[in-house]
Amino acid sequence: MSSSNSGKAPALVAVEPHPIDIDVDSHAGHPPGSADASGTLEHAFINEPAVDDHDGDLITTAEVSHLKRGLAERHLSMLGIAGAIGTGLFLSLGGAIQTGGPLGALLGYAVVGGIVCAVQFALGEVTALLPVTGSFVRHAGFLVDPALEFAIGWNLVYGNLLSIPSEITAICVLFQFWTDLNSAIWIIIFIIATVAVGVAFVRVFGEVEYVFAILKVLMVIFLIILGLVIDLGGIPGTSRIGFMYWRNPGPFVEYIGTGDWGKFLGFWGVMTSAVFSFAGVESIAMAAAETQNPRRAIPRACKQVFARVLLFYMLAVLIVGMLVASDDPRLGDESGTAAQSPFVIAASAAGIRAIPSVVNAVVISSAWSSSNQSLLAGTRVLYGLALKGQAPKIFLRTTSWGTPYMCVLLFTVFMSLSFLTLSNNAMTVFWWLVDLTAAGVLVSWSAILLNHIRMKLAMKRQGIPVARLPWHNSWTCEYRSEP
């Protein structure tokens, strides 16, 4: 639901001690023909026609002249649905069941899923008002403090610098399911492929991710249906499973401790892995200045989070808990290939032998898709930091088609960390990189929620009603402005 008024809104300023009086030259440049800037965020509250002509987008003159709007609404819609569908869903659910039990895993993913929904709605509201490159990183500079913008911006750049080699490491491990070919070959191939997508026009990224998003969604739907068929005894020669594993070994697992405390720790441990699984949902708004009609496209993509959380993750966790016992030793497989997937374990037990290779192929595509998203998010944040003078100006250099190629070059250098997989234990390297990046996800989510709180407090202080936002959702914190 969105609404807007035709009257001119009072200036939006933040709650003291950090007023948002924006210098037009450094923060709020406008494309030719856009609404006149007043030096504050007043012009961010726009009339409905501006949804199409980008008036009041608050992007800088550098963004207007250097970046190109190549992402369409259909790209963001699919990214909104499939952005979090990756190795976490296909491989890590078994570990969640082993740690927390079927009910503990379901509750853990439900709690984190609820947080993700709140984060997405908060991100959608603020981004619809301020559709700038760098998304919530730049929002922090507008709404909270430039120091926070600097901190979370470099935290995000750091996280994405390590996320890409971690995904390429996962790809190498996954190929070991089929062949013992030297991992260096796969590393070189996927580094070249990732850089090619990153340097190309942003529409190429959109089309590539659109195709992989469809593949991932279809695969999840297929696995959920297959899981139901197996659970209900629909495969010839198999019996109905139902909720047998919820009774024995039970709905919870005693993790680290014993008794109720151990069960709580199991539930808590699941939430840690759930955060990693949902990581990346916030990246859909990173290229807002390169998105066509961002005030319409980004909120619609953010609303798709319900389908992602409820249909894919929650249903998948429920079915996996029905298919595989929490004490099944195969869940502890540390190979990192499709062999550890609970869907593969259940299919193999039912005599379906083609599933492992299919799942492995889709997981490889998911991992590469995630590396592409990390490259897009990381380079756009770095570009946004350079716009504000918080990163070297060399990162402002772009190609004629609008790609910040110096940012891509920096990320390419760090992709060489993938060659650490040539050591004896590739999965150890993978988990090192995951541990270094997972904590940054919580920092990013906290920043998104803080930006939203500051925006709402500023609006309340100025008496600006929620209805003046380009898009708002009734699930976020509402208030009534004083008459």
Image: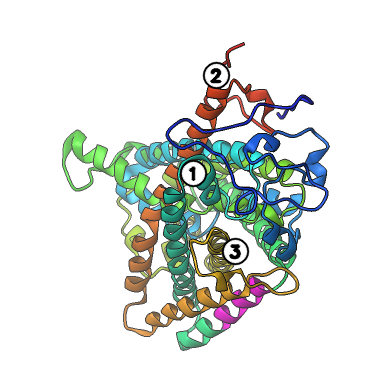
Which is nearer the N-term, disc 2 or disc 3? Answer: 3
Residue 135, relative to residue 174: is it above or below? above
The residue at which mark 2 appears reads as 479
- Farthest residue to the left: give it: 258
Q: Is residue 222 visible?
A: no
Which of 217 and 372 lies nearest the eye of the viewer?
372
Q: Position of residue 10 (x, y in %)?
A: 65, 26
* 295 to the left or right of 340: right
- In the picture, residue 261 is in which quadrant? top left
> What type of secondary structure mainly makes up the magenta span?
helix
Quadrant into which the C terminus falls? top right
Give the residue at mark 1.
319
Tell us which disc is closer to us: 3 or 1: 3
Q: Tags 2 and 3 in contact by the CB under 8 Å rule?
A: no
Task: Identify the residue under disc 3.
Answer: 376
* Residue beneath the point at 55% across and 50% down: 138
Closer to the chain start, of discs 3 and 1, is 1
